[in-house]
Amino acid sequence: MVFIKHFALAKELNLPMFLHSRSSESDFYDIVKAHRDKFPGGVVHCFTGSAKEMKDLIDLDLYIGVSGLSFKTEENIDVVKQIPLDKILVGTDCPFCLIKPDYAGAQYIKTQFDFTPKGNYKCDKLVSGRNEPCNIV
């Protein structure tokens, strides 16, 4: 499998893995657990799994990355609240994974930016529907 070559390269270069587990449930965990000795560490980014999945991944000494999708539902928010502070990483997954107005997490956003419609780029405004690093305040 191709990803096994990635594990080997990460180990050879002593670099962490940036792992994406979207909608893969136990398959992802089983693969990572079976090959955990083949890479020095990493982050499971854009995490939307259950509290058990999160704890299992932390037990493998991995970090949990959260983005806008991690705040889509109240259940997602409850899981994020349980991530130990020394194991959580915050990212935008730019240009994707914006916390949309209909997401449960939208109620917690206090900072507002001016937006311009897609395709109408302006240096002083964000593009509507696009996530940017400056959204992490």
Image: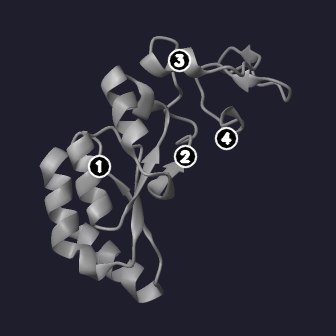
Amino acid type, label 3 = Ala
Distance Cα–Cα, label 4 vs label 3: 17 Å
Instruction: Give the residue at x 14% y 61%.
Output: 30
* Camera-nearest residue between 9 and 53: 53
Corner quadrant of residue 60? bottom left
Badge count:
4
Alpha carbons under labels 1 and 3: distance apart: 22 Å
Query: Which quadrant, please, contains the N terminus?
Result: bottom left
Residue 24 percent coordinates (x, y) = 20, 45
Residue neighbourhood size for the residue with mark 2, other residues' Cα within 10 Å, grouped as few (<14), some (14–19), many (≥20): few
Q: Earlier in the sequence, mark 1 or mark 3?
A: 1
Q: Earlier in the sequence, mark 4 or mark 2?
A: 2
Secondary structure beneath label 2? strand
Which residue lies most toward the bottom here?
A: 12
Marks 4 and 2: which is nearer the front?
Answer: 2
Say which residue label 2 marks.
90
Q: Which residue is mark 1?
A: 54
* Residue that badge 3 annotates: 106
